Amino acid sequence: MTKFSDLNLDAKVLKAVAETGYETPTPIQAGAIPPALEGRDVLGIAQTGTGKTASFTLPMITLLGRGRARARMPRSLVLAPTRELAAQVAENFDDYAKYTKLTKALLIGGTSFKDQDKLIDKGVDVLIATPGRLLDHLERGKLILTDVKVMVVDEADRMLDMGFIPDIEEIFKRTPFTRQTLFFSATMAPEIERITNTFLSNPAKVEIARAATTNTNIKQGVVMFAGSEKRKEPSQKRALLRALIDQEGDSCSNAIIFCNRKSDVDIVSKSLNKYGYNAAPIHGDLDQAHRMRTLDKYRDGDLKFLVASDVAARGLDIPSVSHVFNFDVPSNAEDYVHRIGRTGRAGRTGTAIMICIPRDEKNLADVEALVKEDIPRVEIPEKARVDQPTPKTDEDDKPKRSRSRSRKKPEDKPQDAPESKSEEKPKSDKPRNTRNRNRRNDPEVIGMGDDTPAFIALSFAERVKG
């Protein structure tokens, strides 16, 4: 069996690895580290939770052991799709490089440009960044990538999902052609394959598991659920989640609960806390400091349930997650693989349970087609059972007759009813305007007749004189 000591890593790196408690490399580490140390490009394909971060961090530290960085010109670059994953890579670098003099800078959103500029100006050996923030520094003229010796792209399929591929291509163009590239992904979409063919030179391909497969040590299940009424379904679905958590009992030591929408993340978190479950939300609308505090509390065991959007689906290194609950079936089938990959890590067993409502059945079919297996169905816990909606019948599909004012049949007409419209009473009780009618009946009047006032008959001279 291969050990880290067999991989030709620097002695200082091996000492740091030994202190973390790891002795045996994972398959992706054993396959990727040797060609990386030889200076070759590496294309690594492995499912989430197999140790890809150490696969590039350890050889990078060894390769950068000699040399010194210049101001604004990092010697290596690591690109990660999310702030959390970038921060995790930075933590791993600190752990494995603590006996070296290598320096690093973390460039992510939500933190001060000024502080980041100070680090870059001093010169860093390892630059860890998200694509957006890195391009911001490049456009401001604060960063030069012409001295990059090693470039790493981590979670490339997530980069594709988030629309970062054009940014990645732009960043590649700003690095020297002679760089070494380490490229890691859980799946290989055609767009990613095009990128690797363009920017990698004769890479050593290390494929540990078939793309989009799930760990065999994760027990999976899906609950098919329909609410009794559409307006009640959300609250009944949250009650089902609580019942599933309770059903797992003490085996559920902690869990990550994934929702598709940020608004649902907040609602589900508040609902769990209302019923006495220790939960907190994490999603992209929260500021970086808040998200990191929440993750630290979860890692330390002060928080039992982490309710998350897909921002937390990939790259979070939390080894002891016992359960993953998919409150929603992910709309992107590949996200399912990454979500449940948060449990069953580092050889541990894990449980992943998903709730599927009728409108999510197509997404469920896409997930099962991707992983090439049927996810076992799980019975709804008794305490969460609700009256299912009444099935539609053919009568329900017939158009409803609109209401109309009923008309009386001729035989039902009262005996004293008027025989013609001219005899009908006016609908309004107000008197009709009879002014015009009376005027028509008055005798014709011409001038003023005998009623002419005397003063009008006088001439103008007589009126003036008088």
Image (tube, rainbow, N blue to C red):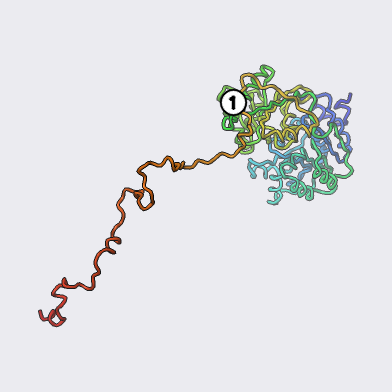
Q: Picture coordinates of residue 316 (x, y %)?
A: 71, 31
Q: Is residue 427 visible?
A: yes
Tag 1: residue type? Leu
Is there any visible trace of residue 52 in the rendered image? Answer: no
SS at circle 1: helix
Q: Position of residue 367 (x, y in %)?
A: 75, 33
Question: Which of these two is toward me, 368 or 198?
Answer: 368
State left or right for residue 9 relative to residue 232.
right
Along the horizontal axis of the image, is 64 left or right of 330? right
Which residue corresponds to the image point at 20% horizontal and 72% vertical from the top-left?
448
Q: Where does residue 111 sit, x and y in percent of width and height? A: 64, 40
Label 1 sits on residue: 272
Q: Quadrant of the C terminus?
A: bottom left
Q: Is residue 117 left or right of residue 404?
A: right
Vertical order, 316 against 128 (above or below): above
Depth order, front residue of 333/30: 333
Image quarter hosting the N terminus: top right
Label total for image: 1
The residue depicted at 30 percent of the width and 52 percent of the height is: 431
Which residue is painted at 59% across and 39% down in the image? 399
Farthest residue to the left: give it: 466
Question: Where 389 falls versus 103 (above or below)?
Answer: above
How crowded pointer 1 is (Cα within 10 Å; few <14, some 14-19, many 20+) is rated as some
Where does residue 263 sit, x and y in percent of width and height? 60, 36
